[in-house]
Image (cartoon, grey):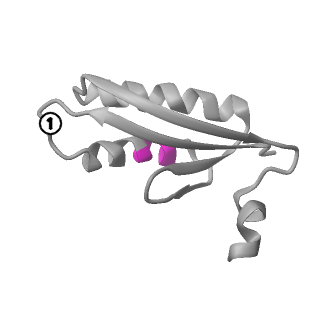
Amino acid sequence: MADTLMSIQIIPKTPGGEDVIPYVDAAIAVIDASGLPYFVSPLETTIEGTMAELLPLIGQMNRRMMELDCTSVISQVKFYHAADASMAELVKNYR
């Protein structure tokens, strides 16, 4: 049962200084492959799961950036941890 929301923004330093969007897309593909529910917003992506499921994703996304020859990556991460953590619950008043 999900008890944690993690929002992450990946900021890669691309090998040739090109646009980061294809690299961010590759990071989102790592999230998608996890099978966990997620929501992409303009500046970050929020994923719903357990801490044990979410923490490894940070490393997987960073490793993927290195595989794509990024020279460095900044990962800005936020966590919300509660027994009833869900994206739907937190935004229900706005949908």
Residue 57 occupies quadrant:
top right
Q: Is residue 32 above or below residue 79?
A: below
**Dot 1: element:** loop
The residue under label 1 is 17
* The residue stretch that appears in magenta: 28-33
Q: Is residue 15 above or below residue 1?
A: above
Which residue corresponds to the image point at 84% horizontal and 43% vertical from the top-left? 82
- Quadrant position of the N terminus in the picture: top right
Q: Position of residue 20 (x, y in %)?
A: 26, 44
Which residue corresponds to the image point at 73% horizontal and 37% vertical from the top-left? 50
Q: Position of residue 75 (x, y in %)?
A: 46, 32
Q: Is residue 72 above or below residue 9?
A: above
What is the magenta segment's predominant secondary structure? helix
Q: Amino acid at mark 1?
A: Gly
Magenta stretch contains residue 80: no
Q: Alpha-carbon neighbours of circle 1 within 10 Å: few (<14), some, or many (≥20)?
A: few
Q: What is the count of numbered marks?
A: 1
- Quadrant position of the C terminus in the picture: bottom right
Q: Position of residue 72 (x, y in %)?
A: 30, 23
Which residue corresponds to the image point at 31% horizontal and 34% vertical from the top-left? 12
Residue found at the far bottom of this picture: 95
Q: Position of residue 93 (x, y in %)?
A: 76, 73
Q: Is residue 55 above or below residue 4?
A: above
Left or right: 20, with 84 as reference point: left
Left or right: 23, with 18 as reference point: right
Residue found at the far right of this picture: 83
